[in-house]
Amino acid sequence: MKYRTYARFAALALSLTLLTACGPKEENDAQSNPDGSISSSQGSASIPEQSQPDLSLPESSQPDASQPDASLPDKNQEDSENPPVEEPVAKKSLSLNSSDFSLFKVGAAYQLKAESKPEKGTYTWTSDNEAVAKVSNKGLVTAVAPGNAAITVTDSKTGLTASCIVRCKFEADKPASGGSASSGSGSSSSGGNSSSGSGSVSTPNSGSVDLSAFYSTVTSNHQFGMLSLADANMIKDVYPGLSDVKTNQCLPYINMMTMNSGEIALVEVASSGDVDTVKGVFQDRIDAQVAGGAFYPSAIEAWQNNSRVVSKGNYVMMVVHEDCDAIVNEFNALF
């Protein structure tokens, strides 16, 4: 009995010793509940569980709405880096096809042409000396008396002006010569610079009109293609029948370019009875070109619409040019 009592005390003392050595249990030690579940003795509600995010702090995966999003382009920065490109403004201009030309007879005419860029309005033409040269509302300048005049065109759209000088070089009291006129009609047009070739040209008689000088005047006032004076063989091919007519002056200038859209032929016959023959030869030339000889549609149209055959006394002219009517006026003014 004593031994059992001693053993119990010894066991109790050992238990107290062990309890003292181990100390108190941690507050967060788990305890078993009667229903078998485990509960924690740690109860601080101020610390959130790790499985739930703290909503008071923004997650690192979500952008802060208070700061600009660097992933979106800054429009102001783009505008500064790429300034708007200004469209170039078309330069306005007004020009004439000639700045200085001469007329050698009362009634001689020259067709001025104006060009506006980028657009045109209505043109107004004026002469500062109508006693010397007049100008129509279409830009046709006509010589009145010896002297100089300035022709000016004004564009109503742009307000720009362009001017040129006309020099009327002739004697006011020089008598006119020549005979009655008869005219024919044909067709066609052209453009370009002119040059003359070589050929056999008769020297005009004293008192006759110098057709070579007239050709030089015409081709300086009106731009043709590359013209060449036809020789005897070419005259037979291009103007069949012309070589059979006796002439004092025979100057057929042919356009040597493939697209033949400009030509002029000037003839003074020895006998007035051959005037109609020469006019017929010239008309045949026009008809052949219109029928397909000119080949290109634009050239055919030019021969059809801008050609003329005219005569004054023993003088006959065929001209194919866009300024054909102005050239006819210059031809008539020779007589």
Image (cartoon, grey):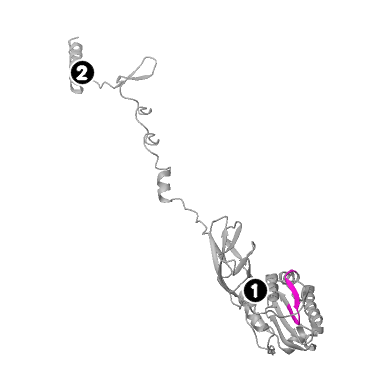
Q: Is residue 128 shown in magenta? A: no
Image spot of residue 89 (x, y percent): 50, 56
Amino acid on which the number 2 mark rests in the picture: Ser
Which of the pair 46/209 is nearer the observer? 209
Which corner quadrant of the image does residue 207 belong to? bottom right
For image coordinates 73% across by 86% down, the residue present is 234
Q: Residues within 10 Å of mark 1 (few under 14, many from 20)?
A: many
| Label 2, residues with CA under 10 Å away: few <14, some 14-19, many ≥20 | few
Q: Which is more N-terminal, label 2 or label 1?
A: 2
Of the residues shown, which amino acid type is indicated by label 1? Answer: Val
Which percent across, then down, holds residue 4?
Answer: 20, 12
Q: Nearer the viewer, residue 6 or 254?
A: 254
Q: Which residue is mark 2?
A: 15
Helix, strand or loop at label 2? It is helix
* Callout 1: SS: loop
Q: Is residue 59 above or below residue 265?
A: above
| 191 relative to 16 in the view: left or right | right
Image quadrant for the C terminus? Answer: bottom right
- Which secondary structure dominates the residues rendered in magenta? strand
Q: Position of residue 209 (x, y in %)?
A: 68, 83
Mark number, residue 53: none
Residue carrying label 1: 106
- Residue 63, compared with residue 23, is above or below; it is below
Residue 260 appears anywhere in the view: no
Q: Nearer the viewer, residue 237 or 327?
A: 327
**Residue 313 placement, left or right of 195:** right
User: Do the residues under discs 1 and 2 have CB atoms within 8 angstroms?
Assistant: no
* Chain part drawn in magenta: 305-317
Q: Is residue 152 visible?
A: yes
